[in-house]
Image (tube, rainbow, N blue to C red):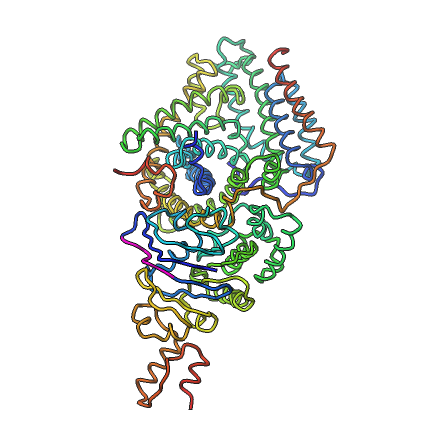
Amino acid sequence: MTSSLSLYAPRESGLHRLHPLTKLTSALLGVVAGIALPGVWPNYAVFLLLLVPLAAWARVLPDFGRVVIKIALPFALSLFVIQGLFWTGGTPVVEIGPLSFKAEGLYFAAKTTGRILVVMGSITLFVLTTRPDQLMIALNQRGIPKTFTYVLVSAIQLVPRFQAKANAILDAQRARGLETEGGFVQRIRALLPVSIPLVLGSIVDVEERSIALEARGFSHEGPKTSYQVLVDTPIQRVARPVMMLGAVALIVGAIFVW
Amino acid sequence: MIHVENLTYAYPTGTGPALRGISLDVPEGQFLALVGSNGAGKSTLCYALSGFVPHFYNGDYTGRVVAAGHDVGNTKLGDLAGEVGLVFSNPFNQITGACYTVREEVAFGLENLGVPREEMILRVEDAIEMAGLGGLGDRSPYALSGGQQQRLAIASVMVMNPRVLILDEPTSQLDPVGSREVFELLDSLSRNGGATVVLVEQKLEWIAVHADRVIALHEGQILADGDPRGVLASAEVERMGVGSTRYTQAARRFRRREPKEVDGILPVTLEQAAEYLGP
Amino acid sequence: MDRLRKDFTTITWVMIPVAIAINMALGFLVFSLKIPILYLDTVGTVLVGLLCGPLAGALTGALSNFAWGLFGNPGYVPYFPVAAVIGLLAGLFGQWGWYKKWWLWIFGGGLITAVAGAILSAPINAYLQGGVTGSGTDVLVAAFRAGGASILQASFLQGLVTESVDKVANYAIVWAIVKALPVRFLARFPRYENVRSD
């Protein structure tokens, strides 16, 4: 699990400057590709020849690499070990004592790891280069109501605050002698004095915060305007539907062709 | 600008009415201060003037409230926003959480009202300046001090140009520095006229100097209504738990010690005290 | 349904992000304290389902998974339908009055949600991640696979074991939270009737 700060990494890059919906569409295309592409090599090709260079262009390569490896590595390990060793009725290729790695299992592990790299990589690249509130504004402009997008943006701002509070309460409790190591039951008991004030306090605040939102016209009916502007270019406006078609083509291909 | 007619209200889970038969009229541009002991009904009256009673809290509601030209009991909260503004004491809970910068936070209300962008930009800058937050426009609302956050809350409501502004104990959760900042802002609001302001505050010395009129509430009813000196120097008002200014207290102690006949009502401000206790 | 629309009051819209943050804070705490088996990352979702209705619960679940993605855990993102169903079920159980009998809420609600969660997660897990979890529970996956289960079956069985414990705990915590909240505050929520003690 990574740190509590939102993953968005502000940089001056061409990728960052793209319209949020362009990036969202690309991420969707990447996810579909990761799922739909056949075999082992296509996904690795997409990852190494497309995603990694894009990450470099966006100047987020270190963050990208860090997150993707952190996510993919445990899966890759489990895949190679578990599916490799326990593939039902497979052809053994490497013997380790009474167990053996099966070829089909290893192939499956390689294929799935490639899939994980492309799917998670696409999502990660999107998150690294897109400012959440700008994404929300883009969605608003496409007709998604402000109440809905408000939820995600305010959740993003609340989460680090909660985590900080949880850590602070945890530290204070530890200083007071709270045992956080040890047996299962002990750790559970450590959970309570931290989570209860956090949860109850935040829920009670909901009432006042709703009043504040109402006072700012949250439930006002009628067309809403936007203070921020998003930059969109003609090329992107064309590229987006093209990418959607590409995604559909991949799905069709996956179902009927390969 | 505000007309309250026989307002009686009880919260749904409350024990008895929080407001009983309140009637009052506030002319446009007046700076009205509400005082009273805890539980007197000050906050409830604030909610009633801004529509949260009855629309948010439900409960038993009889009587009529007209504010900024709207029949509050029959107008939706969404339509009252921008007409009657409400600021309360917790600065943190008034941050929407949907905005990354102070400018966007101020603009939030205008976006909801559908104000055109060109106009928004100007009004946001004006509001930020007025609240003394110039230079903080690009800061995150969460990265401000309590006093700054409260001034941001006031600016975010004022930017919507409400004809009535209600502030329910805006300084009670602030440190002395923050309180001072907010009082300075309220001071300029009170002098620049325009909006009709209803302020609930404990700082009686400030009210004595700046308010046009003071209403004291007690157990849901109006106990006293008049100019600051008349209300705040009243012994009855003090007896009902409202308290008094230190000038009144000093003068009272003086009057007890000095047998000299001092007529007139007790002072509530420094100037009045000087005059009262003078040669 | 009109009822579903009325569930979305301003309070609901403010509660959902708080619930998402609760999901993440508790999930993170469990992780920091290295508590095994439990995840406790759907407490907020179940709470919203109970207090604001099935649709609000579903929305909370789905958005929580996207929020995890935004915070550097993209692995959660594909499971958003599962989280949505968890919120939906909590709303339905609340609507059916299950909260009023604590054992029905905690065990009935918890276990049914666990089964539904395991059924829905297994195909996603099998297809996208090859049926492994990348964590300690893979021991279970290995055991099931060694026993001859297919990838899908092993994933489902692993899910069933971990989810059963975790979801029952989630439901128990939600029960305790609602019991601890003052009534005048609970009355604000659109589905207050689900928890009102009559």
Q: Position of residue B95 (x, y in %)?
A: 50, 51
Q: Is residue C18 above or below residue C37?
A: below
Q: Position of residue C111 (x, y in %)?
A: 34, 25
Nearest the eye: C22 or B210? B210
Q: Position of residue C84 (x, y in %)?
A: 46, 29
Which residue lies at the image location 40% right of the left edge and 64% below the top edge?
B34
Q: Position of residue B98 (x, y in %)?
A: 54, 45
Horizontal arrangement in the rendering, residue B142 relative to residue B264 (left or right): right
Q: Is residue B175 among what the camera can see?
A: yes
Q: Is residue C178 above or below residue B65?
A: above
Horizontal arrangement in the rendering, residue C118 relative to residue A64 (left or right): left
**Rendered-image quadrant of the C terminus of chain B:** bottom left
Q: Is residue A8 among what the camera can see?
A: no
Report the number of discs: 0
Q: Is residue A126 magenta?
A: no
Magenta stretch secondary structure, dominant: strand
Nearest the eye: A41 or C3? C3
* Range drawn in magenta: B16-23
Q: Is residue B138 above or below residue B249?
A: above
| Quarter of the figure with residue A40 | top right
Q: Find the residue positioned furthest to the left.
A: C198
| Quarter of the figure with residue C34 | top left
